[in-house]
Every structure is written in C-alpha cells, then in structure tokens.
Amino acid sequence: MPPCTAAAGLRHHMRMDENQARALLSARRAEAETLLKATQRQGQADREAEDEPGDVSDNAQPLTDEGIDDAIQRSLQDRLAAIERAEQRLENGTYGRSVRSGQPIPDARLEVNPEAELTVEEAAADEASG
C-alpha cells in the first residue's frame, strides 16, 4: 500500500470527479480566452476609430469606451489567472478545497464556478469586509 501523503489524503476527500473538473475548467478557459480575444479586437477597433476624422458629439466617449475595454480585459485576465490556479490545484490534489481554510467547497458551487477558491461563506465575508 502506498504511503499516505497530504495531497493523497485530500484527493481521497475530493468529491467532484477529476474529469468533470477538468472539463468544466477547460470550458471556462475557452470561454474566457474567446471573450478576451474579442475584447482585444474591439479595443483595437475603438482605438483605430478614435483616430478617424468625423462627427464626435462627445469628445470623452472614445476615452470612456477605451476604459471599459481595458476593464473588461483586466477582468478576463483575472478570470484566466483564477482558472490557471484551479488547474494547478487539480494537479496538486487540492482542488475542491478552500485555499484559505482547507474546507471542502460544495460541488454545486464548483459546477457554477469551477475556479472557486473559497467557500461561499469565506467569499461572502471577503465581500462584506472589502
């Protein structure tokens, strides 16, 4: 019988099937990458349109559009980073557990948000304090 390591012990307690977790994370990655590419293309188009002469009733509009594009890109990059961390936890055998407390994250939460790092209670406490 192989020695019991902490990662093996956590793997034993992991409830969500690894293949299901991989599929969910893969789908989320593909979605985020597609949205990021589209947002980057739109941002480039907005910047190119900004340089064209024409009627602009609101001189601030191009800057507002650029700020929105940048915010969306940052959000998508953050999501991709969270997905990468979740994929790493899956490889390490710690997927499905809070990175803070080690408590199990319910499958229902992981199915909706496969890159979740905290339990619902921990995430709610973070939102309330920040």
Image (tube, helix red, strand yellow):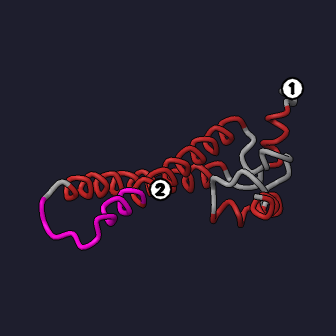
Q: Is label 2 in a helix, a strand or a loop?
A: helix
Mark 2: few, some, or many residues within 10 Å (few <14, many ≥20)?
few
The quarter in which the C terminus is drawn is bottom right
Residue 83's x, y, as percent?
Answer: 58, 47
Q: Residue at x 56, y 44 (%)?
A: 81
The quarter in which the N terminus is drawn is top right
- Camera-nearest residue between 118 and 107: 118
**Residue 34 image label:** none
**Residue 3 image label:** 1
Asked whether 127 falls inside the magenta stretch, the response is no
Q: Is label 1 in a helix, a strand or a loop?
A: loop
Tell me the kind of residue under disc 1.
Pro
How far, Cα to Cα, is label 2 from label 1?
A: 47 Å
**Residue 71 image label:** 2
Left/right placement of residue 113 relative to residue 97 reads: left
Q: Quadrant of residue 63?
A: bottom left
Identify the magenta region.
53-67
Residue 58's x, y, as percent?
Answer: 29, 70
Work out whether mark 2 precedes mark 1 in sequence or the reverse, and give the earlier one. Answer: 1
Left/right placement of residue 89 relative to residue 39 reads: right
How many badges with numbers are in the image? 2
Residue lying furthest left: 53
Left/right placement of residue 109 relative to residue 23 reads: right
